[in-house]
Image (cartoon, helix red, strand yellow):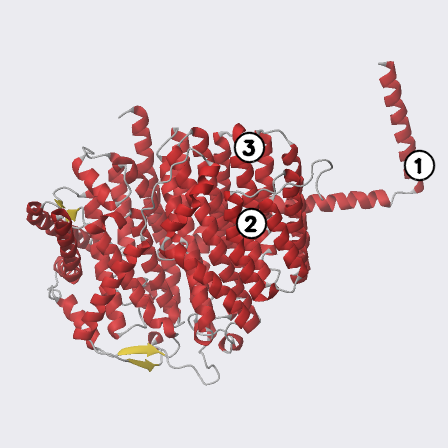
Amino acid sequence: MFGLPGQGMHLHLDALSLLFGCILLPQVAAAALAGMRGSVPFWAFVLGMGLTLLAGDGFTLILGFELMSAASWLLVMQGDAKPATLYAGVAIFSAACLIPAMFLPVSSLAFVLIAIGAGAKAGLAPLHSWLPRAHPAPPAGVSALMSGGMVKVALYVLIRYAFVVLAPAQQPWWGVALAAAGALSVLIGALRAVLEVELKTLLACSTVEYVGLIAVGLGLALYAKAIGDAELSGLALQAALLCAVAHGLFKPILFIGAGEVKHATGTTSLNWLGGMMRGTPRLGMLMLLGALGMAALPLGPGFAPEFLLFHAAIGAAATGGILARIGFSALLAVLGIGAALALAAAVRLIGLGFLGRPRSLHAAAAEDARRGPFLAMALLGVCCVPLALVPGLILDLLNPVIMLLAPAAQTPPLAYAPITLLVLAGIAALAAGFAQTRWGVRGLREVPAWNGGFGRSPAWLPFGDPHTQASATGFAEPIMRVLGKGLLGTAMTDPAERFLLAPLFRLQTKLIRLAERVRRATIRERLAFVFAALVACLLALGLGQGG
Amino acid sequence: MLAFVLAFIATALHIALCFAGAPLLTGIVNKLRAWLLGRRGPPVLQPYLHLAKLLRKTTLLPDTATELFILWPLGVFLAIAVAIMLIPGFATGMLTADAGDYITIVGLFALARAATMLGGLETGFGFGGAGAAREALFGLFAEGALLVLLLAFALLAQDTSLDGIATAFRSAHIGISVSLGFALAAMLTVALTETGRIPTDNPSGHLELAMVHEAMALEYSGRLLAFIDYAAMLRLLAWMNLIGTIFLPFGMARAAAFLSWPGGLLLWAGKLAVMAAALSVFEVSRAKMRVFRVPEFLGAALLLGMLAGVFLFVAARIGA
């Protein structure tokens, strides 16, 4: 069969691969339902991801990983050729880091290469700026699988090497570096998610944030494992893995929903949507569920991982040296601000896209989700329910994985009990219902909105003047003014683009000019060059023999 | 068995008192504020009459709102109601103690904030959108500050549930530390913002451009407005309970010890009265600040929260 000569190809299934396989399975089913069934590159993409998870040796892993990259590049190219080049570049860069790392001895250098290679593929800051460009390009089902599944596969490679293969050489600073990169991703991803106007770009930025959250959890776990803190490593691993599970469920809902918004209205710009909950209630309710997860609110699928992550950060700040503790308290502040930014982004998505007045006739006349995508979203939504209501049971299922990654880890029971909260909310709702029937009157009367006392809009503006409604940019303006200008600059560009991509582009331009100069050389210059090369060669030879 | 029955009764008593007493607390604060301003002020029971009036009024549904219009006030109310059931009041060791983790409470407040913001965006008119955008901004630093504060509490109490923090602070010899002073200042800043009081928002303001919380409720009427107003009253009580539990845990009763209840109840009422008085004095002596000054105000809270943690690290290092 395939494989390195004389060694062959090894497949290996353990708890970790099984967990990530289970994360992928509902997404693949959903993406297939959402209309990708007939696409060959899509199935190659799925095959690549599956092969990466099942790989038992480095060669198979790279084979699967590159198959995944190549197939997803084709899929990105089908959607939009412009980001596809950047995407291919990042994929090649990540391969250039991963392949040498597979054959290096167990060392810190191998970890750094793996972290850079897998981190670039997962969209970990500062190598994330390609993600908000490339993930929105392909059809919705593929976007969903790329955001929910492909970044998880990249993180799987990181976990597999950092925790299992490279375990003998691990150092505390690995975890600290990973957590720092994660905190940066959380901040930039969440902030950009609040500021972006395009629905799919917004969701991709939120993916960067979630990758950051997972990386923070993994980093804390690596740090705790290296310093021998059994409880913290268990807690942080629980947080990271549950975060991966949750993100793999609610993010595809949102991406497939964004695809349906595009199908129904022809746009994904929040500035052209509005009031979609009226015409597309099924789509709207499922998007609301996804947004509940994205905002990490209680009783949603995203709260339990966030809860564990905060506890892990507090646990990390409670032990260790004083500088590390100050650093971990800053991490806690970043996580808190990131959570609030995620809430603002989710509220903005629902509030501007699905509530309020339509901002265009397309949004007003939108038809509800088609059958396939609706079934896909509903499938994922049903999978979210156990995660939202009984996260403790799912944590128990994660135990074998945690034992595999950190054999000494202790996993305390979860202190967040959504069922109790539901029961208490039920009591309050009953009391409110009683008070209303006892002292209140029933019935609703539909009237023109009060709108601060302004008159009704003229007949040629059936939904009023769209400009009197908060726009997507306007809603984000206060946050832009206070936090965005400091972090992103007045031009609102990602720091990674300004400091990483822009210099690369400049370098490329310079190299092209140089190559052009060489190509246009006259015959005399060329002859002079050949002669100079000959002299230099002879000189080097003579000096080498003489010495 | 007896302990369970007592804990159940204490929990039920706490919930009943909180739900019944929240409008009274708002009434007292309003009355005190009016007195300090030299007015006679509305009767103390006015909030009850206000709620009863709203319940009997017709509820209007704006034609530009979607079907979820009625969901958001309910969401705000339920989130705050669950939070108030989880925060200890007069006694520790209630049945809800295990579920009352500090982060769950922060999450419930965030849920209430999200529902308020969505309610503001629902009808799609300018004031609601502006209020929601400002609330999103305030939420950033408020949530960050609250979570950083937990670090100081968790380090001192070795527990992250409110019940555990209260028990530890009541029994252990924490004393008066610089950290807790910073933490109190930060907590009060966040509490003033979250409950929509001066200097960040004006609960009695009726100038639309300056409103934050009120602006998001402009289109609500009738029983939906009653939910929102009642949730605001509950929120004030919840924050007072939270601050009382963490910073003034002395004399709190134990749910399993029946004889400690009367003292605990009396002290609880006393603490709430003191906090209400302090709030009204603070409110009449301050002016409302510009919207874009508020992030600086809350940023200071975030820094104070960080400092509270850092001082604890330093204290642990030098063995103080």
- Position of B131 with respect to A283 (left or right) is left
Q: Which chain carries label 1?
A: A
- Mark 3: which secondary structure? loop
Q: Nearer the viewer, residue B168 or B109?
A: B168
> What's under tag 1, amino acid-wise?
Leu
Which residue is labeled 3 in the image?
A166
Does label 3 or label 2 sit earlier along the sequence?
2
Structural crowding at the residue carrying mark 1, measured as other residues with C-alpha within 10 Å and reported as few (<14), some (14–19) or many (≥20): few
Q: Position of residue A499 (x, y in %)?
A: 59, 44
Residue B100: x and y, percent? 26, 49
Disc 2: which residue: A151
| Whole-number angstrom distance, CA of label 1 to CA of label 2 | 52 Å
Most foreground residue, A429 or A471: A429
Q: Name the residue under label 1.
A: A527
**Chain letter belonging to callout 3:** A
Q: Is mark 2 on a helix, strand or loop?
A: helix
Please indicate, yes or no, whether residue A108 appears anywhere in the rendered image: yes
The CA distance from mark 3 to mark 1 is 53 Å
**Badge 3 vs badge 2, beta-carbon distance below 8 Å:** no
**In the current view of this chain or complex, which residue is farthest to the bottom?**
A459
Percent position of residue A480, x then y: 46, 55
**Residue at the location (44% across, 84% down)?**
A458
Q: Which residue is drawn at 59% across and 48% down?
A: A497
Query: Taking the image as drawn, is residue A275 in sight?
Result: no
**Of tags 3 and 1, which is closer to the observer?**
3
Of residues A447 and A476, which is closer to you in this image? A447
Disc 3 residue type (three-letter)? Leu
Q: In this view, does B162 lie to the left or right of B115?
A: left
